[in-house]
Amino acid sequence: MINFINLIRKKFRKKSKDSYSQKGEDLIVNFIFNVLKIKHPTYIDIGAYDPIKLSNTYLFYQQGSHGICIEPDPELFKKIKKKRRRDICLNMGVGTSLENKKSNFYILSSRVLNTFSKQEADYLEKTTNQKVERIIEIPLLPLTKILQKYFSDKTPNFVSLDTEGYDFKILQSLNLNKFRPEVFCVETLIYTENKDEQKRNEIIKFMIDNNYMIHADTYINTIFVDRNKWINR
């Protein structure tokens, strides 16, 4: 009888779901795709940082999905390429125009805060304990060109965007009439160490103006869903 009870408990026990994101964003996005009946979403992870830790896409990789991971930091890129063999891994930055082929990339003492933005790097040095350790030149390719090259003009289902200061410009460069991912997860909080955080409201307004709805906000990141896709689910 005891063995039978233990068997029943094991069968019906709810398994905890592991999150690899900073604040459980991957579980929220996974719920959205389950509702939209998209079993294996494709993705593009811009500013991937790590193949597993703080990743908004590793959960989907584990479930059999694949996509593109973009990481400008050469050392971090090597780790991602080694662990994410089904993904296309690109050691570059996402440009916002066809004119800019390369850009300075600022590597900070905490590499999760690396950025192409000199303004962001200067701000972090002035207001936090972060220091710019190196400046290297990294090739750039506009997001539209990346999608055309690797998705054959198709649209990935999910875009994870975390570029420390360039998120808004990258979103503005994307033709959302032609390329409409179902879900975006975008960092919308300005990093500080003095508890004076501010939301990047220009990103939120831009997405709403382009007919995306806020599905969730984890304070650090905002998750947007194509309004029409959600309404017609």
Image (spheres, helix red, strand yellow):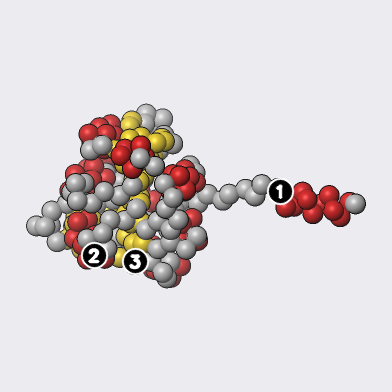
Residue at image position (42%, 53%) is 38
- Residue carrying label 1: 12
Q: Which numbered mark, 1 or 3, is in the foreground of this view?
A: 1
The residue lying toward the viewer, choosing from 77 and 128, is 77
The residue lying toward the viewer, choosing from 107 and 53, is 53
Task: Pick whichever of labels 2 and 1 is earlier in the sequence.
Answer: 1
Q: CA distance from mark 2 to mark 1?
A: 43 Å
Disc 3 residue type?
Cys
Residue at image position (21%, 46%) is 176
Query: Horizontal placement of 208 versus 80: left or right?
Result: left
Q: CA distance from mark 2 to mark 3?
A: 17 Å
- Residue carrying label 2: 152
Which x, y percent locates residue 5? 83, 49
Residue positioned most to the front: 232
Disc 1 residue type?
Phe
- Residue carrying label 3: 89
Q: Is residue 225 above or below residue 152?
A: above
Q: CA distance from mark 1 to mark 3?
A: 39 Å
Q: Which numbered mark, 2 or 3, is in the foreground of this view?
A: 2
Tag 3's secondary structure?
strand
- Asked if the residues shown at circle 2 and circle 1 are in contact, with their CB atoms under 8 angstroms apart, the answer is no
Tag 1's secondary structure?
helix
Instruction: Give the number of the disc on residue 222.
Output: none
Q: Is residue 57 above or below residue 167?
A: below
